[in-house]
Image (cartoon, rainbow, N blue to C red):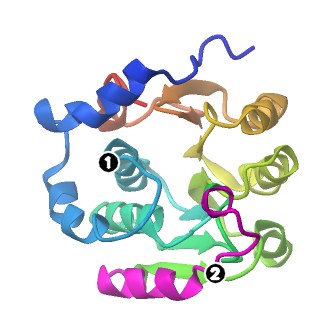
Amino acid sequence: MRSWFPAGSRRCAFNTRLQWQRRLGWEPREFRRAWDALKTIEGWRYRQDLVLLYLLARDLSGPGVTLEIGSYKGLGTAALAFGARDGGHEKVHTVDPHTGDRQALETAGVERLPSQEDFHRNIAAAGIADIVVAYTMTSDELAARWMGTTIRFLFVDGWHSYDAVRSDLRNWVPLVTACGGVLVDDYANYPEVAQAVDDSGDALPPRRVRAGRMHLSSSGPLPPAVQRFLRLPWG
C-alpha cells in the first residue's frame, strides 16, 4: 500500500543537505527574510521542511485556521506563522503538552523534557506572538474543547505512535476545508506513523504525494509553488 512513498535513503539525505530549492531559486524571498529568526530555534527540521510549511501555510486557499499538533520549541510553528501572515490568513493554532518530543526524549534517554518556556521565548523573539494561539495540553484534550472552527491546513507532528496519530487524524481531519491540506510528519521515519496514516486512508483527502519524509494529502490541486517545490530531490 505504501509503494508510492519510498523510504528515506542516504541519497535522499544528501540531496536534502544540498538545498536544491536555493540553488534553483525556488525559495520565496519572504522566507529568506524569515530565515534569520528560524535558524535560531532548536528543532529537528531541514530547511526544506520549513520552506514547505511556509508555502502550505501561505498558499493553501480558503478560510480556516492553521492547526499544528506538536509545537516543541516553535520551529515549525514559526515557519507556519510567517507563511500564514504573508498570505493574509487566519492565525496559527498549535497544541503541545510540552513534556518532551519523542525524538528528543529518546536521544536524551529521559522521560520528560519541558519545552514550554523555550517555545514562548522563541515565538516572541521571532515577532509572531500576535498570530500564534498556543495550547498547553494534549491534542485529544484540545479536540474535546474545540468549538468547531474549520481548518485550512493541518500539520500533524505530535506523539509518533500508532494510536496518537490515528486519534489526531480522527479528531481533526473532518474539520479540514475542501481546499485545505493535511501534512503528517515522519511518515517515512516511523513505521507506526505510516501504518496509522495508511489505516486512516478513507478519512484523508484523496490526493496524496510524497513531501520529503512526510505525507501530504489534499482534496484539490496543490498551489503551484507547492507543486513545483515537491519536484525537488529531497527528504
Q: Quadrant of the N terminus?
A: top right
Most prominent secondary structure in the magenta stretch?
A: helix
Residue found farthest to the front: 109
Residue 115 sits in quarter = bottom right
Q: Nearer the viewer, residue 6 or 86?
A: 6
Residue 205 position in % (x across, y down): 67, 34
* Up/down of 33 relative to 144, above or below: above
Q: Nearer the viewer, residue 111 or 102?
A: 111
Residue 21 sits in quarter = top left
Within-10-Å neighbours for mark 1: few <14, some 14–19, many 20+: some
19 on left or right of 182: left
* Up/down of 138 relative to 105, above or below: below
Q: Is residue 116 magenta?
A: yes
Label 1 or label 2, whichever comes before in sequence order: 1
192 on left or right of 185: right
Residue 77 position in % (x across, y down): 46, 67
85 on left or right of 27: right
* Amino acid carrying mark 1 in the image: Arg
Q: Nearer the viewer, residue 62 or 223?
A: 223
Q: Quadrant of the C terminus?
A: top left
Q: Which residue is mark 1?
A: 47
Q: CA distance from mark 1 to mark 2?
A: 24 Å
Magenta residues, start to end: 104-130
Residue 48 position in % (x across, y down): 33, 42
In the structure shown, which secondary structural element does the residue marked by tag 2 occupy?
A: loop
Query: What residue lies at 43% left-to-right and 51% top-to-bottom?
Result: 45
In the structure shown, which secondary structural element does the residue marked by tag 1 occupy?
A: helix
Residue 16 position in % (x across, y down): 33, 33
Q: Which residue is mark 2?
A: 114
Q: Nearer the viewer, residue 162 or 224?
A: 162
